[in-house]
Image: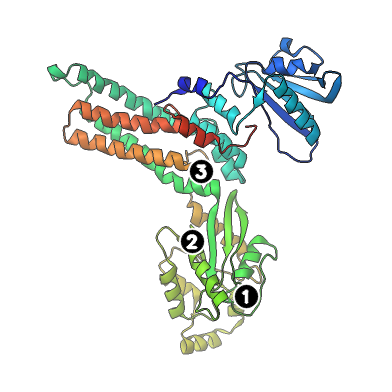
Amino acid sequence: MNTHNSQLTTHNSEDTIVALATPNGIGAIAVIRLSGLDAIAIANSVWKGKDLTKQASHTIHFGHIVDGDLVLDEVLASLFVAPKSYTRENVVEISCHASGYIIESIIKLFIKKGARSAKPGEFTLRAFLNGQLDLSQAEAVADLIASNSKASQQVALQQLRGGFSTQLQLLREQLVNFASLIELELDFAEEDVEFANRDQLKNLIHEITKIVGRLIQSFELGNAIKNGVNTVIAGRPNAGKSTLLNALLNEERAIVSHIPGTTRDTIEEVLNIQGINFRLIDTAGIREATDAIEQIGVQRTMEKISQSALLVYVFDATEITIEELNSDIESLQKPGITMLLVANKMDLLESESPEDRKSESLASGKIQNIGDFFRTSGLPDFRTISISAKEKQHIDELKQKIYSSAIKDQLSGDETLVTNIRHLEALQKTEEALIRVLGGIDGSITSDFLSMDIKQSLHYLGEITGVVTTDDLLENIFSKFCIGK
């Protein structure tokens, strides 16, 4: 088991590191970041302007980067003197012109003067090792950079500010207090005394288990916010799936034809609804395939449905029979997949006279009244809707139902959400250890075994925030960061 201090020498944090902190490519300005004990001295050694070593922290200075008599660029140097910086080390950020040649020349010059190239995520790793961030906050930095919706940005920002960490720290402190009392009992084992009240410990474990359970359950929503919601549009051929995709996106993304089986492969697009990204997947129509290519398309449709979180089942309200619709609903409903029932082509249905519609429905087995059918479908009202994709009728209402079906009114803005699979696994292991503690209390096990299970709980909680770390864990986490962060 390694702690922060034991990691410092392992990761050579005494070195001064350098990297480009802005994306590569054509642009006006690039930022080159230096961090380490000698960062200011190295920058000053190639600087023409005020002596940077004598300037105050959090100041910006105009000058030139020079290599001997050669001026490489006129730049701005931002100074952050330790410990008042992102890494808690001396940090210099050079804002230069974003020429590939200039950037490469300045970085090579800094390396020549004693810096080394930073590894992926090494600036944030140093922030963690130096106590500026805990591990879950450090991971939130990567999530914030990768956020592509308002909701994912807000969740990452809340975690970066320590919301998740604060909650876990409170749980851990309470467990540590009881663990200390249990350890004290072991010192007086021969006298058979109990310093830790078992009823109080049991109540505490129950309370912590509830909180851990809520955090585990929040992963479904947190993961949806972070990575988007897989949303499959499925139905029989010519139900209007591609027309619906175009209507939702408000652009002609999919080919629309009256010929059944036009969509042979899946089409994927992203739709943002109230800050949440929904990855819409238009699929081939579900039917007996007439050729090998269509058969592959139908197979892919079924695969996409099994991988989805939300299924938007679209049917032609003017053509499908009640028997066919019930059969489709029964075959497509899967555990863990939320289904939305969408009756399409309502513009055609409403254009028919009630008498003609009733006569046709009775003769063919088609649906006479969509509202009546929805009420007998077994799905809640918020998961059924009638639309006309062609005329774009009730598309906004459908978007709201898509959002509500996925989010289920769980997003209030101030709750703690788990978005990281590593955190989820650690919480699940914590829950298992806590359940063993409860079982041990009820079974009146000895203090030494009770202490072991409590320590296991503390270990798994500590893994999330980085109180407990290993080299392999840190390498795995920070290798996924971009260089320069």
Image quarter where the C terminus lies is top right
**Local crowd at mark 3 within 10 Å, few (<14), some, or many (≥20)?**
few
Dividing the picture into quarters, in which one does residue 170 lie?
top left
In the picture of the structure, the residue carrying the numbered disc 3 is: 412
Q: Foreground: 235 or 357?
A: 235
Answer with mark 3 or mark 1, whichever residue precedes in sequence: 1
Q: Amino acid at mark 3?
A: Ser
What residue is at 42 percent from the left and 25 percent from the top?
2
Left or right of 90, for residue 177? left
Instruction: Tell whether label 3 touches label 2 (CB within 8 Å).
Output: no
Q: Secondary structure at mark 2?
A: helix
In front of the other: label 1 or label 2?
Answer: 1
Q: Where is 29 relative to 364, above or below?
A: above
Left or right of 469, for residue 209? left
What residue is at 61 percent from the left and 67 percent from the top?
244
- Whole-percent x and y of residue 362? 46, 87
What residue is at 47 percent from the left and 30 percent from the top?
471
CA gap between label 1 and label 2 equals 30 Å
In the picture of the structure, the residue carrying the numbered disc 1 is: 262
CA gap between label 3 and label 1 equals 42 Å
CA gap between label 2 and label 3 equals 19 Å
In the picture of the structure, the residue carrying the numbered disc 2 is: 382
Q: Foreground: 46 or 57?
A: 46
